[in-house]
Amino acid sequence: MLSSLVAVAAVVAIVAGLLVLFGTRGHDSKADEKPAGVSTPKPTSGPSTVGASVPRPSTKPTPEPTGAPSSEPASTAPTQPTETTQPSETSQPSETSQPPETTPSTQPTQPAVTIPAEERPAIEVYNNTARKGLADSVANRARQAGWTVAGSPDNWHGKIAESTVYYPPGMLDAANQLAHDLGIGRSKGALDNMKKDRLTVILTSDYSG
């Protein structure tokens, strides 16, 4: 019986000791507890990560512009105006030509072939100047050159521009040869009032013989 009591007392003592022990730890733990909602920041073991949020400069090279920028400013000089064509010079007025003559005149040339005397047409010689005897002297020159002078040399009334050998159709070659033989500078188709079977020579003041 006594042993039982001793055992019970021992158990009670053990229980009381445990209660005291746990009761004291409970108060201590409550004293250590801080008000709810307040958290003590725990020190981090590693380095601060605040810097991690700061953007670091990109290690990639900045792409260069495709075209190298010109070191010189763009030219602001005004563009030169396109050259305007010079106004064409007014054409010089053509010289007033003399009224056209009814038949074209030709400059006598050296005959390629001399016309035989028997094939030459007859000629008439007229003086259109104040020089007396001019027609006679030229008629004699023509005879010496192999020409046949028809009629008597006479004066020609009217105005003739220059000494001329007039020829009817088909006698141009003969007129050119006669003009060459007499030193006359112009041959021309016969006028309406001239005979059409011969050459007509009219001498003016330009004839030097």
Image (tube, rainbow, N blue to C red):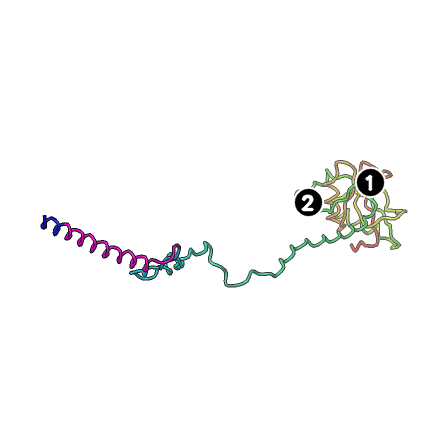
- Expressed as whole percent of the image width and height from the top left, the position of residue 81 reads 65, 56
- Expressed as whole percent of the image width and height from the top left, the position of residue 141 reads 77, 50
Q: Are marks 2 and 1 in contact (CB under 8 Å)?
A: no
Q: Residue at x 68, y 43 (%)?
A: 114
- Expressed as whole percent of the image width and height from the top left, the position of residue 67 reads 47, 55
Asked whether, in this view, residue 32 is left or right of residue 148, the answer is left
- Secondary structure mostly seen in the magenta stretch: helix
Q: Residue at x 86, y 45 (%)?
A: 152
Residue 197 drawn above or below residue 140: above
The three-letter amino acid code for the residue at tag 1 is Thr
Please say whether residue 26 is one of the residues in the magenta stretch.
yes
Q: Residue at x 33, y 57 (%)?
A: 33
**Quadrant where the C terminus is found in the figure:** bottom right
Write down the region rendered in magenta: 8-36
Viewer-proximal residue among 183 and 20: 20
Query: What distance separates the C-alpha of mark 2 from that of mark 1?
Result: 25 Å
Residue hosting label 2: 111
Q: What secondary structure is marked by label 1?
A: loop
Viewer-proximal residue among 82 and 54: 54
**What label sits on residue 102 in the rendered view?**
1
